[in-house]
Image (tube, rainbow, N blue to C red):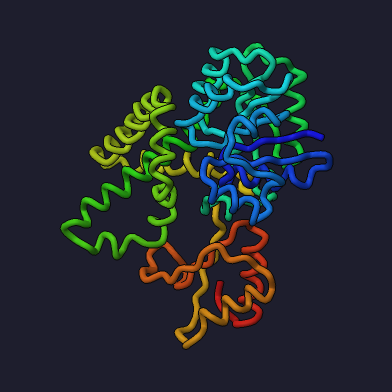
Amino acid sequence: MTTISIFGVGLIGGSLALCFKDKPDTRVIGHSNNPISVDNMLKHRIVDEATTSMQEAAEAADIIFLCVPVGALETYLVRLKQFSLRKGCIITDVGSTKLSVVECAEKLGFEDAFFIGGHPMAGSERSGMEAASAHLFENAFYVLTPGTNTPPTEIDRLANLLAWTRAQIIRVDAREHDDIVGAISHLPHIIAVALVNQIRSYNESNELYKNLAAGGFRDITRIGSSDPSIWRDILVNNRTVLLKLLDDWDRQISTFRELLINEDGEGIQRQFETSRDFRRQLPDRRKGMLSPLYDIYADIPDHPGMIGQIATLLGKHRLNLSNLEIIESRLDVPGVLRLSFRDQETAERASALLSEQFSIHV
């Protein structure tokens, strides 16, 4: 029997728990300092057992997952160091920055336990244990960042366990991980927040900015609505990488500034062509750091009850709708109703169904 203890049973921790609960000869223990959260994990059958005692959960575990905010990881490692962990216990985390936590674990020097940094590159537009799914990690990259002295046999042991999630396991140096993730996730979050705040400042004197900011603007700034406290910790933790990335970003913006000053239309076109060519090479069916939504736009007639009929039809065919939005401004979008789904297959099935049943142009 392998015992897995999960500290922080939210979206990621809860999804891991649901994956491992179906694994034979495996027991999953959930931990929270909040008794209400403990009751909820048991109520929703996310874990086999749950406790408010960190020591109890830690000392019972063969493998420990720290699914707590990045800013709390080092505190948890220090606490774990004080317990009598099982010999050969593997400690891992799910944070989106890796170098600092790997260095902290190496500095603490666990004697009979092994720390291996981890980062499942999958997410959801929802949060909390209620959003947990046993399928969250399918077709996603799961990055492992072991320390320099981690035995290969222990890395393999964790990788074999994580294969149960159906994620693709890759091994990357912690510093390289932070460089890459800083560029593809952390920097875009900064840009989205800055752009939204720029438009917000304009809106203070003219509310048309907010009223007309629909369609494409909402799509490219969706990540600007991410949890503020979580992203505070991530950005501060990865600040060295991000400061360099922001310098590079300034150079990119300066290039566009010069192109506009010089009225260089051909240069602007080349920038768009270069961007388009690279973007077309990006995989579109693999889960990544920024959780996608698959949207279809329906040009529906203005009839009473039409939206209700659409929602009923999708529910009848078990097509899970993540979001529904009435588009007031048609700039950048081809319809008046946006329907969002979590995977492309469901979106395609919904599109075909609406076209067939209601002759709706999708």
Q: Residue furthest left?
A: 205
Expressed as whole percent of the image width and height from the top left, the position of residue 15 reads 64, 46
Q: Residue furthest bottom?
A: 304
Residue at horizontal 44%, vertical 65%? 333
Q: Is residue 146 above or below residue 32?
A: above
Q: Taking the image as drawn, is residue 270 in sight?
A: no
Q: Taking the image as drawn, is residue 298 in sight?
A: yes
- Place residue 87 in its image quadrant: top right
Residue at horizontal 49%, vertical 36%? 69
Give the total number of marks visible in the rendering. Answer: 0
Residue at horizontal 67%, vertical 50%? 46
Expressed as whole percent of the image width and height from the top left, the position of residue 176 reads 54, 22
Q: Which quadrant of the rendered structure holds the C terminus? A: bottom right
Horizontal arrangement in the rendering, residue 171 relative to residue 77 (left or right): right
Q: Is residue 291 above or below residue 95?
A: below
Which of 68 and 190 lies nearest the eye of the viewer? 68
Expressed as whole percent of the image width and height from the top left, the position of residue 273 reads 47, 43
Which of 61 and 261 lies nearest the eye of the viewer? 61
Residue at horizontal 32%, vertical 31%? 250
Q: Which quadrant of the rendered structure holds the N terminus? A: top right
Which of 283 and 142 lies nearest the eye of the viewer? 142
Q: Is residue 34 above or below residue 253?
A: below
Which of 206 and 60 lies nearest the eye of the viewer? 60
Expressed as whole percent of the image width and height from the top left, the position of residue 139 reads 69, 44
Q: Is residue 114 above or below residue 219?
A: above
